[in-house]
Image: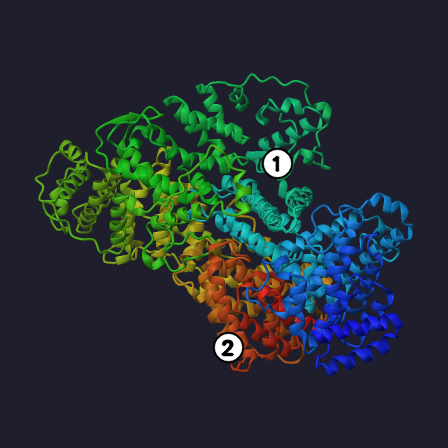
């Protein structure tokens, strides 16, 4: 304490004598050395600042202070910090504006010398002083380290940010622009009792001039901090790791740039150049900025190609086209929402392609339009696709865009809620993606060929165009009272108009879109001034009309256009009379479900809600309350049973909810004895067996119930409809997870605004234990598939049901049941009861009949095998059982499928005598298959059959086929055929060749108009039995898409070559070759062991890279590349252009890998296949010379793209998906491999150039495209990889890698920036 008193005395004496600053510093140094005070001294800095402020605020003391800073008696930056807490609040003209000028001078002189600070020996202790002086733990408590000694680098970042933000808020306040309370030492320290007005009058204007000059200087210093290479890089760490504070900081910057009068007077600075673009944005950075970040020497070579390529190149969005087409497979139902699937996919592609959001939206719209165009003239078959394709374009795609916009706006809400100031909380949460959507929709209008509507929706498109024309012509008042269905149709519309209407209906854009150039084309004078409205319509309903039969017919055939109309119908379904309820159910399941694209998601959830009616408070019965709703529930279930309707539920992710609604219905009606009946809407009698069958068959279609366990090997694919995952338990788990997760984020809160307030579901979990009868059946079903069924217990109650069912089978063939069971296991001892007795015995719950059905089928099939029952009698008997209880079709399917798998039955000779013969058109089917596969180069096994070797099928398959052929193709049987039809195709495809062609031939004989469909289905089985054929098909996909090879018939490449123009015989010359991508999407689910695909796709990718490098260019681009100005060259091929094509090849390979096996295959790729490839590099031909070096680099780059792209598809670029939870472990394993190899712990056998290109490419893609992945990884592991990257001279990439790890490495990164001068 004595020493500091002597310091004060020395300084005061020097002041009085006006001692020179140099002399004063020498004297003071001598004094401190004598007192053993080490220099620079933080205590001295604090003492000198306190001495000046404010009793000794004179020029000479400031000179002493500056000299002490120059000779390092005091830490310069600590003095700046201490002055900031004293001087800035006293900068007011009535206080010490001159001190503020001096502070700004010292700040400018010392604040940019951060490198010397970090390298100084007392750096840690100095940062601790600064931490306490600025009270950083209070300002940034969310980001502060919990222990008392925070990392010096973190303090460095926060200290610099604090000084800049303090200057900013002081400047705003000085100009009267600060709209919130200051967070720092900014507010003037004025005595509230002082008469400011009088003092201002008495002071001369020079102090006000000085204040303006100070503010001008401060603004220029702020701009210097933002533009300086070193300080801006450190401030970017705040942008990355302290987003809430950064957002408030940017708001203040924008306020100053927009409204500052002083800024506008500066000659060397303008509001536009005040602060750089890369610091204006919140993290993650925009795609434009990512391109400017040169983080890898490998990616630098391809940067020029990225600039040359159009962002609307179809190759960039091939994964969307593939997944869209895959989702249209009507035989497979997705448990997950297509909306969520495509939301994640579009985010991933936008990141890896580095495009603006309007390009991503445009790529999504165009891919969906291509899907619709492929179905303009579809091949006729049992699975209609056009309505589902239109659902994908006009509803699902629109909801994907809505999700992406709401996600951004949800993040803005979260950021505003975390903001340390209040001004962000009052800002409207309108994100930039909404504007990007407008841009994409305006550009979409130029694609006239794609926008041409299918004939069936031309009238609807014309209506949409008429609505816009009416609005533009000033008839908006008329539109308020008139539904779009009442408008004239003399305007020419297309799919663009329907897309715009879908976006307006979901409030993504407003009606200003009607005024876009080219949107309204009809002359205004063609529109009538008044339009009669005498026909029943939706507007009639909204005006109060009752649900009369004519109105019900119109509303069932015409889709609703607004949520209000659907809610009106829902009110009738809840509160109306019994007749009105049934009418409302019919309307909801009509056109509004299938083609109500503006309201489809609401209709889906309204129907599910109606399938779970609540118990009425007045209900006093003892039976399940659902029984009283039998006619109403039956109308709903029959109404949603068509193939396209179930597919719509699937696309909306409503399958788990629908399954949970159907299970109680199955449990209730399946447990009831059919003692009463109701009258259905069609006038026919309805019993509980019929209601149960409709519910049960519909429930079974929601998962692949008939697939044996051996086929459950591809779980987790892109469209998760694969066997092992889809079962009743899994559907309930998904349903429970949906309710458990939804509503917890701002994004969900925004999304919930779209849904009707009239819909609410019970959010409690539901488990299979709640449905004991269904659980028992499901266990029996699994036993049946595994052929572990127990023998029938003699004398049990099930025995009587078995006897009754056998009697029913025998009633038309004049045989007794005993003749069928005399050799069957578990045979009956029945005395041959009459048919009436049999029917009386069958008045039992449906679950009991299902339990007995396998024993009946076993007896019947055994009797047929031993000649006691003819094939025709077997088919007739099976049909009789199915007609009595259609739910038994499930047992028939599972039993016969299991028996085919067992392979113990003798073959059935399809000779036309015992069993139907396919000989009439089998040769035609063979020719059709060869035409279909012509583009793939795959050999088709011969189908020639002579008289000595007739066609054969396994006996259970022949019985199954015969049963299906007995069904009539009418509306009443459609819901049952769509259950057994796919099962028949799946079972036939799994049998030896040529079972499927035989089945297809016989069905083509029955329904000739479906012959093309069955030929196409049969062609897929060529790939089921040969891995080589699958590999050849994949190779064809690569060569056609990339335009490689002269033999390729699609030598222009792209999406058109991969997916073609659909399938059918509507082309000239009959049936045509099918594009290889379409074929692969129809056969990959039947590949028994998909694991081999990983190695094969890697091999095909490497072959494609070699062909690309050696000049395998598509014809359309060859003439351009001969004179290309982009990037490096070798021969006639541009390296940059080759890297772009290699990226497309990797994108294609990643798409096929994800579709084929999902996260399982991708995990195998990253943790096993790629490490093994680098350790062995098998199967690669060594290239020599310049071409060889380029091929090696391109291979590494291709593998890096392939790995990262696959990961983004499977796990996403953020943590919004469930699959992302396994990502840190998988990526961590791979980075451990990279780190070990970089450390020299692993010996690699691949080319060094390939390895270097892979490492730099993989890490660069992670840094640029998936920064959130890095946040999840171990800090120590990242440091090891970063060290290895520096050994590869990738210093900037190494720094970026650590920078992205977050607050845990922020301090170390800041120190690296300062030390390296970056």
Crowding near the residue tagged with mark 1, few <14, some 14–19, many ≥20 C-alpha atoms within 10 Å: some
Specify which label sits upstream in the sequence, 2 or 1.
1
The residue identified by callout 1 is 504
Render colour scheme: rainbow
**Which SS class for mark 2?**
loop
Query: Which quadrant does the N terminus fall into?
Result: bottom right
Say which mark, if any, is on residue 1178.
2
Image quadrant where residue 353 sits: bottom right
Query: Of residues 857 and 130, which is closer to you in this image?
Result: 130
Query: Of residues 1147 and 87, which is closer to you in this image?
Result: 87
Tell me what residue is drawn at x 46 percent, y 24 percent: 553
Crowding near the residue tagged with mark 2, few <14, some 14–19, many ≥20 C-alpha atoms within 10 Å: few
Q: How many numbered badges does the structure rendering display?
A: 2
Q: Is 71 drawn above or below residue 209 in the view shown?
A: below
Q: Position of residue 205 (x, y in %)?
A: 91, 50
Residue 367 seen from this side = no
Tell me what residue is drawn at x 72 percent, y 45 percent: 179
């Amino acid at each position: 304490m004595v020493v500091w008193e002597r310091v004060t005395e020395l300084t005061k004496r020097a002041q009085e004598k006006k001692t020179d600053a140099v002399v004063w510093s020498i004297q003071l140094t001598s004094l401190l050395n004598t007192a053993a005070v080490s220099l620079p001294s933080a205590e001295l800095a604090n003492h000198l600042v306190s001495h000046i402020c404010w009793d000794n605020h004179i020029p000479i003391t400031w000179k002493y202070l500056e000299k002490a800073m120059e000779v390092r008696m005091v830490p310069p930056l600590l003095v700046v910090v201490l002055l900031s807490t004293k001087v800035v609040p006293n900068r007011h003209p009535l206080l010490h504006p001159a001190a503020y000028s001096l502070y700004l001078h010292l700040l400018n002189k010392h604040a940019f010398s951060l490198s010397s600070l970090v390298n100084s020996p007392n750096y840690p202790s100095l940062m601790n002083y600064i931490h306490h002086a600025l009270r950083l733990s209070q300002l940034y408590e969310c980001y502060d380290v919990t222990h008392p000694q925070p990392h010096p680098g973190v303090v460095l970042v926060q200290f610099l940010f604090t000084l800049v933000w303090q200057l900013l808020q002081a400047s705003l306040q000085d100009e009267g622009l600060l709209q919130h309370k200051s967070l720092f030492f900014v507010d003037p320290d004025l005595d509230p009792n002082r008469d400011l007005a009088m003092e201002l009058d008495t002071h001369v204007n020079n102090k006000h001039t000085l204040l303006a000059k100070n503010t001008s200087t401060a603004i220029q210093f702020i701009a210097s901090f933002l533009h300086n290479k070193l300080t801006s890089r450190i401030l970017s760490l705040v942008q990355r790791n302290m987003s809430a504070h950064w957002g408030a900081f940017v708001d203040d910057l924008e306020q100053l740039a927009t409204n500052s009068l002083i800024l506008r007077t500066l000659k060397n600075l303008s509001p536009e150049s005040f602060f750089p673009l890369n610091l204006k944005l919140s993290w993650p950075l925009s795609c434009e900025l990512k391109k400017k970040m040169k983080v890898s020497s490998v990616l630098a070579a391809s940067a020029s190609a990225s600039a040359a390529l159009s962002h609307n190149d179809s190759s960039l969005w091939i994964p969307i086209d593939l997944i869209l087409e895959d989702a249209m497979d009507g035989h497979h139902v997705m448990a997950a929402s297509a909306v969520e699937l495509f939301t994640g996919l579009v985010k991933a592609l936008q990141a890896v392609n580095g495009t603006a959001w309007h390009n991503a939206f445009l790529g999504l719209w165009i891919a969906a339009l291509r899907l619709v165009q492929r179905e303009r003239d579809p091949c006729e078959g049992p699975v209609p696709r056009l309505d589902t394709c239109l659902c994908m374009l006009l509803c699902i795609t629109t909801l994907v865009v809505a999700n992406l916009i709401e996600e951004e706006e949800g993040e803005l809400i979260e950021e505003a809620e975390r903001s340390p100031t209040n001004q962000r909380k009052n800002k409207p949460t309108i994100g930039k993606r909404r504007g990007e959507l407008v841009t994409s929709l305006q550009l979409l209008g130029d694609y006239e060929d794609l926008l041409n509507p299918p004939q069936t929706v031309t009238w609807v498109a014309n209506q949409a165009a008429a609505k816009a024309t009416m609005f533009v012509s000033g008839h908006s008042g008329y539109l308020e009272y008139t539904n779009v269905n009442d408008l004239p149709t003399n305007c020419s519309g297309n799919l663009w108009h329907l897309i715009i209407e879908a976006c307006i209906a979901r409030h993504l854009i407003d009606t200003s879109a009607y005024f876009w150039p080219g949107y309204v084309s009809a002359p205004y004078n063609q529109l009538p001034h008044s339009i009669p409205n005498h026909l029943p319509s939706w507007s009639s309903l909204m005006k109060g009309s009752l649900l009369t039969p004519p109105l019900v017919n119109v509303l069932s055939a015409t889709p609703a256009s607004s949520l209000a109309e659907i809610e009106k119908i829902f009110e009738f379904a809840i509160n109306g009379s019994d007749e009105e309820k049934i009418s409302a159910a019919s309307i909801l399941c009509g056109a509004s479900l299938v083609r109500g694209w503006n309201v489809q998601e609401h209709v889906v959830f309204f129907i599910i809600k109606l399938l779970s009616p609540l118990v009425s408070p007045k209900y006093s019965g003892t039976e399940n309350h659902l029984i009283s709703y039998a006619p109403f529930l039956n109308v709903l279930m029959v109404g949603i049973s068509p193939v396209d309707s179930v597919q719509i539920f699937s696309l909306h992710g409503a399958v788990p909810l629908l399954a949970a609604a159907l299970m109680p219905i199955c449990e209730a009606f399946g447990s009831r004895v059919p003692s009463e009946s109701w009258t259905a809407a069609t006038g026919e009698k309805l019993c509980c067996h019929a209601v149960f069958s409709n519910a049960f068959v519909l429930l079974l279609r929601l998962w692949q119930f008939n697939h044996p366990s051996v086929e459950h090997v591809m779980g987790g694919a892109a469209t998760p409809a694969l066997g092992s995952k889809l079962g009743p338990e899994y559907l309930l788990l998904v349903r429970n997870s949906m309710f458990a997760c939804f509503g917890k984020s701002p994004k969900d809160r925004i999304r919930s605004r779209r849904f009707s307030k009239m819909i609410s579901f019970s959010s409690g979990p539901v488990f299979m234990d709640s449905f004991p009868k269904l659980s028992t059946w499901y266990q029996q079903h699994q036993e049946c598939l595994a052929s572990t069924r127990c023998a029938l217990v003699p004398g049990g109650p099930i025995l009587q049901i078995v006897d009754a069912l056998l009697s029913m089978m025998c009633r038309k063939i004049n045989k007794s049941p005993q003749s069928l069971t005399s050799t069957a296991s578990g045979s009956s001892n029945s005395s041959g009861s009459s048919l009436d007795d049999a029917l009386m015995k069958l008045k039992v719950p449906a679950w009991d009949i299902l339990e007995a059905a396998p024993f009946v089928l076993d007896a019947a099939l055994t009797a047929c095998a031993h000649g006691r029952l003819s094939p025709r009698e077997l088919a007739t008997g099976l049909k009789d059982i199915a007609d009595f209880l259609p739910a038994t079709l499930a047992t028939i399917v599972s039993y016969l499928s299991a028996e085919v798998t067992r392979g113990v039955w003798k073959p059935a000779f399809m000779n036309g005598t015992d069993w139907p013969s396919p000989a009439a058109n089998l040769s035609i089917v063979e020719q059709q298959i060869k035409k279909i596969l012509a583009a793939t180069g795959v050999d088709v096994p011969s189908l020639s059959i002579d008289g000595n070797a007739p066609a054969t099928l396994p006996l259970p398959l022949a019985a199954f086929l015969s049963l299906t052929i007995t069904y009539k193709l009418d509306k009443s049987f459609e819901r049952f055929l769509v259950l057994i039809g796919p099962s028949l195709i799946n079972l036939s495809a799994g049998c030896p060749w040529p079972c499927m062609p035989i089945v297809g031939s016989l069905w083509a004989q029955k329904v000739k108009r479906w012959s093309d469909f069955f030929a196409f289905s049969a062609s897929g089985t060529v790939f089921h039995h040969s891995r080589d054929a699958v590999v050849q098909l994949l190779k064809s996909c690569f060569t056609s898409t990339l335009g490689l090879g002269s033999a390729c018939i699609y030598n222009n490449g792209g999406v058109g070559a991969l997916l073609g123009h659909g399938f059918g015989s509507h082309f000239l010359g009959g049936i045509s070759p099918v594009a290889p991508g379409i074929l692969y999407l129809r056969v990959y689910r039947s590949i028994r062991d998909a694991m081999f695909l990983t190695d094969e796709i890697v091999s095909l990718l490497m072959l494609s890279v070699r062909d690309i490098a050696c000049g395998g260019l598509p014809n359309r681009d060859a003439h351009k590349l001969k004179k290309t100005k982009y990037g490096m060259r070798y021969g006639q091929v541009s390296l940059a252009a080759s890297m772009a094509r290699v990226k497309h090849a990797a994108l294609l390979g990643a798409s096929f890998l994800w579709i084929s096996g999902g996260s399982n295959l991708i995990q195998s790729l990253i943790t096993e296949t790629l490490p093994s490839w680098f350790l062995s590099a098998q199967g690669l031909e060594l290239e020599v010379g310049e071409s060889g070096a380029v091929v090696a680099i391109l291979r590494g780059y291709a593998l890096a793209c392939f790995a990262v792209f696959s990961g983004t598809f499977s796990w996403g670029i953020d943590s919004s998906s469930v699959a992302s939870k396994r990502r840190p472990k998988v990526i961590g394993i791979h980075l451990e491999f990279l780190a070990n190899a970089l450390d020299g712990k692993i010996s690699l056998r691949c080319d060094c150039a390939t390895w270097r290109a892979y490492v730099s490419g993989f890490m660069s893609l992670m840094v640029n495209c998936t920064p959130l992945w890095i946040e999840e990884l171990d800090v120590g592991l990242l440091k090891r990889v970063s060290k290895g990257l520096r050994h590869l001279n990738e210093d900037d990439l190494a720094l970026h890698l650590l920078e992205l790890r977050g607050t845990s490495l922020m301090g170390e990164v800041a120190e690296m920036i300062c030390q390296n001068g970056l």
